[in-house]
């Protein structure tokens, strides 16, 4: 179960989602973030921006892409990325 964090920026929420729901597709991530309803009304909440955030995390080795046997592109958090979750502020 995902712990409760303080209000985080959208880019950080992408990382939190990835950390607790790895492996995932971009579509699964978007649906989950829409269900959270925390950032849906923000202007930055667009498919292009969310894809850019995931690609940026791939660039710094926090998330890595891989292809399943079915040919579907998925993403998973690296060991390095999973260690970073402890630095996020949590609600007490």
Image (cartoon, helix red, strand yellow):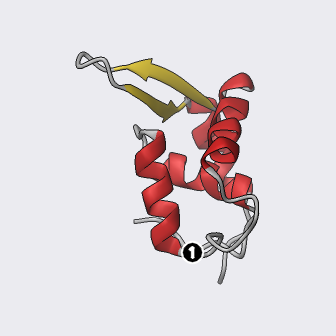
Q: Quadrant of the N terminus?
A: bottom left
Residue 21 visible: no
How crowded pointer 1 is (Cα within 10 Å; few <14, some 14-19, many 20+) is rated as few
Q: Quadrant of the C terminus?
A: bottom right
Tally the numbered discs: 1
Left or right placement of residue 25 versus residue 53 in this view: left
Viewer-nearest residue: 74 or 4: 74
Q: Which residue is located at x 23 percent, y 19 percent?
A: 70
Left or right placement of residue 79 versus residue 25 in this view: right
Q: Quadrant of residue 79?
A: top right
Q: Which residue is located at x 50 percent, y 67 percent?
A: 34
Q: Quadrant of residue 87?
A: bottom right
Instruction: Please name the residue that numbered disc 1 is placed on.
Output: 4
Q: Where does residue 72 sit, x and y in percent of width and height?
A: 33, 24
Q: Residue furthest bottom?
A: 92
Q: Where does residue 88 sit, x and y in percent of width and height?
A: 72, 60
Residue 26 visible: yes
What secondary structure is found at the residue carrying circle 1?
loop
Viewer-nearest residue: 30 or 81: 30
Q: Which residue is located at x 76 percent, y 64 percent?
A: 43
- Eyeballing the image, is 72 above or below 36? above
């Amino acid at each position: 179960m995902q712990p409760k964090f303080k209000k985080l920026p959208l880019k950080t929420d992408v990382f939190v989602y990835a950390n607790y729901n790895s492996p995932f597709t971009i579509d699964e991530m978007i649906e989950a973030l829409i269900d959270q309803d925390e950032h849906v009304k923000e202007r930055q909440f667009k498919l292009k921006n969310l894809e850019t955030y995931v690609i940026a995390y791939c660039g710094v080795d926090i998330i890595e892409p891989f292809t399943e046997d079915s040919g579907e592109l998925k993403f998973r958090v690296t060991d390095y990325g999973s260690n970073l979750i402890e630095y996020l502020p949590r609600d007490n």
